[in-house]
Amino acid sequence: MFYSNIAKFHISIIPIRWYKDDILMKLNSSILENSPVLTVVESSDIAMLRTVDFTFQNLKKHFQEFYNNEIIQQIISKRNKFGIAFLTAKTAINIALKTGCDNELVKLLRKFILTKQKS
């Protein structure tokens, strides 16, 4: 494992698929390019601190090959749809259990599954 006492961070190095919404898509590219690259240096001696020239362009060049806007949009959309469907199902299960209608919900879901699997 590699160890370094210097770490760099820029908002754009976090893959977009990790964001809940497409926030980076909405930001103006000049805002991202002009945002600072944070440098953290671990040192027991403050005199050892040094400045390192590192720009957003270096990061952009390095990560450009991993960035495909269309695929990322599809992933975000699919994840959001899954979240909505899961929340709806969870709410339905809780209501069915509270009201004693769980058998009715199971029948409804089984019918839905059979219908969709046939088509």
Image (spheres, grey):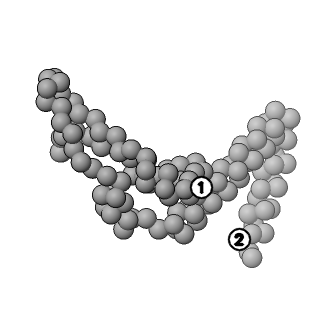
Location of residue 25 by image quarter: bottom right
Of helix, strand and loop, which one carries label 2? helix
Q: Going 85% across and 48% down the picture, which residue do you hit?
A: 104
State the separation of the CA atoms marked 2 and 1. 38 Å
Residue 83 x/y as whole percent: 65, 50
Amino acid under label 1?
Lys
Determine which of the numbered discs, if any, sits on residue 26 in the image: 1
44 is higher (above) or lower (below) than 97: above
Residue 30 in sight here: yes
Question: Mark number for residue 117?
Answer: 2
Give me the disc on residue 72. none
**What is the three-letter code of the residue carrying label 2?**
Gln
Which mark is first along the chain, 1 or 2? 1
Which of the two residues, 14 or 44, is positioned nearer the viewer here? 44
Image depth: mark 2 or mark 1 in front: 1
User: Measured from the top left, where is residue 29 in percent x and y?
Assistant: 50, 58
